[in-house]
Image (spheres, helix red, strand yellow):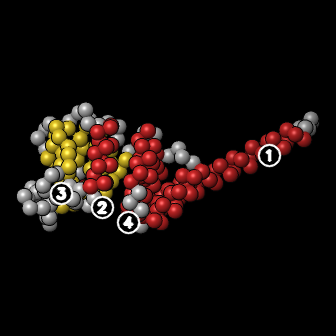
Amino acid sequence: MRRLPTHAIRIVFFFAICACISAQNTGRFAALTSKGIELIDKGRYNEAINALEEVWELDQSDPAVAENLGLAYLYADRDSAKAQGLMETAIAGGGRASFVMQHAHEKVTAISMDTNDFCVGRLSIYKDRMTFKASNPDHSFTIQAGEFKEIKQNKWFGSGEGVYHIRTLGKRTYNLRPKTWSDRETKLVLYFIDKYIKR
């Protein structure tokens, strides 16, 4: 029986070690990603950044990591510039940009958007649609690109609180307010809608 040359054995050994390390990292990255997303769902944004940054520093291929890291930066540090860059990367990779929103169920009054009838959910913007996944599933919705009649920040109702409305060609109206109650977050949402799905 013929023996393999020493250099061939070293090469095979090297690739075997690389495969083991890669498999370990993949499992570790998946665990850190899951942990980061779970922390975001609990509102623990700084901890989520720590978990997701560790993944992002070594592997920037997962759009879900970019999406959730952007969301964490937006709410932990209110760093809309960093959040925007990560969200752009997520959408370019086939993912989405996401935001936490309040959705008013009743008509907004002339005085303010103060209402007891609202739900919280995640607004997600893709290349071809926008979705709102509400805590109350009856209030979840999807709007396809081209179905927007109007989307803009409110001038009177909820002014200074980031409140904006969406009107569709199907005559539906949605009033939303961002988690931060800030015009800055609303402008970021409107930027992504204008860029990707408002046609």
Viewer-nearest residue: 20 or 83 = 83
Q: Is residue 129 left or right of residue 5?
A: left
Measure the alpha-carbon separation of dots 4 and 2: 12 Å
Which callout, 4 or 2, points at the residue further toward the start of the chain?
A: 4
> Mark 1 belongs to which amino acid?
Phe
Estimate the x, y position of residue 115 in percent, counting from the top left: 13, 64
Residue under numbered circle 3: 159
- Mark 2 neighbour density, 10 Å: few (under 14) some (14–19) many (20 or more): some
Residue 180 circle label: 2
> Mark 3 belongs to which amino acid?
Ser
Measure the alpha-carbon separation of dots 1 and 4: 45 Å
Which callout, 1 or 2, points at the residue further toward the start of the chain?
A: 1
Front label number (1 vs 4): 4
Residue under numbered circle 1: 13
Residue under numbered circle 4: 43
**Occupied quadrant, residue 112:** bottom left
Measure the alpha-carbon separation of dots 3 and 1: 65 Å
Q: Secondary structure at mark 4?
A: loop
Asked if the residue under mark 1 is in contact with the one under mark 3, i.e. CB atoms within 8 Å, the reply is no
> Mark 2 belongs to which amino acid?
Thr
Asked if the residue under mark 2 is in contact with the one under mark 1, i.e. CB atoms within 8 Å, the reply is no
Q: Secondary structure at mark 3?
A: loop
- Whether residue 154 is visible: yes
Front label number (4 vs 2): 2
Q: Secondary structure at mark 2?
A: loop
Q: Secondary structure at mark 1?
A: helix
> Mark 4 belongs to which amino acid?
Gly
Measure the alpha-carbon separation of dots 3 and 2: 14 Å
